[in-house]
Amino acid sequence: MHARVLRYLDEVVRRGSIRKAAEHLHVAPTAVNRQILDLEAELGAPLFERINKRLRLTPLGEMVLAHVRQTLREHDALRERIEDFKGARRGEVTVAVTAGLAGSLMPSLVHDFRQRYPGIVVRVNDLPVADIVAAVEQGDADLGLGYDLPELPAFRALASSDWQIGAVVPPGHALAARPSVLLSECVGYPLILPARALSIRGILDAAFARNAIEVSPVAESTSTVLIRQLVLLGTGIALLNPLDVMEERARQALVYVPLRDRHLQGQTLTLVARAGGQLSAAAGLMAERISDAMAMLFAQAR
């Protein structure tokens, strides 16, 4: 019944101004402003501080916004459940993932999901880990998928698996036929490493330090897609986990050789949702599909 004013308020906060919110909503700025003023009058206190033509939420505004976004999520979930009840698999789901997963795991997963549920719109946002956390906490994403996500009271883990880091080499490379290798055996070759902004680099740096190994990579990148391409071109070898190269391994373009160093930490891949609130029908279906894919790929990797 109050969907209009709730969506107007949400968009004003997201866009930072009444004018920008009105443009996004395709309504007149005066209509948005009137709804906000009427709501403030009803509550008896301002929702925004108006400073130099900029809007900033008051403490009351922050509290109302949290309620508004929870209400909008529940409203959208209700509409999807109604459609589901009517036999039409419709709705939308937003998944926040790391860039590496967006380029490896998600393409085939989204394709298969869309084949099965053509009425559901899938949005995949590739983000740094900190932004994945914020997107799920704030309700901008239904699901978050990433490595070594922090354990927070605001989250509930839906699926989790540990992935071993290994050397990624071209077929025919001297290490390709080995069942496993040591870090010390990798540093004799040109190394292409994940950049320090990625969690896997911290794991590798700790292992290098523990083994007193000095490393001078020939290239570094935050993009696992670029790292894979450099290995394919023969620039060097990489240190990644098997999910990072699943498509290249499937077509036998690259070989993954696990590292067997003692105390080398793996990467924990976790699918999370907000602790409070119920997943929409679409998000629930996507969570089930991602969980099944994680379990199947983990079994294959072992």
Image: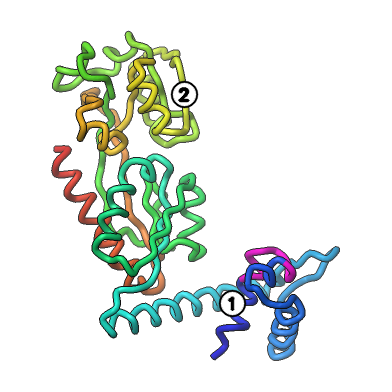
In three-dimensional space, the C-alpha distance between marks 1 and 2, rounded to whole angstroms, equals 43 Å
Q: Is residue 216 above or below residue 20?
A: above
Left or right of 57 in this view: 211: left
Three-letter code for the amino acid on which mark 2 is drawn? Glu
| Span highlighted in magenta in the image | 11-19
Query: Can residue 13 be found in the magenta stretch?
Result: yes
Q: Quadrant of residue 156?
A: bottom left
Name the mark on residue 7: 1
Is residue 66 magenta-colored?
Answer: no
Give the residue at x 19% y 50%.
295
Q: Could you say where residue 294 lies in the image, as x and y percent from the top left?
A: 23, 49
Q: Position of residue 126 (x, y in %)?
A: 45, 48
Give neighbour class at mark 2: few <14, some 14-19, many 20+ (Cα, 10 Å). Answer: some
- Amino acid under label 1? Arg
Would residue 153 be visible to someone looking at this image?
no
Image position of 251 with respect to 46: above or below: above
Q: Secondary structure at mark 1?
A: helix
State whether the magenta stretch is mostly helix, strand or loop.
helix
Q: Which residue is mark 2?
A: 220
**Secondary structure under badge 2?**
strand
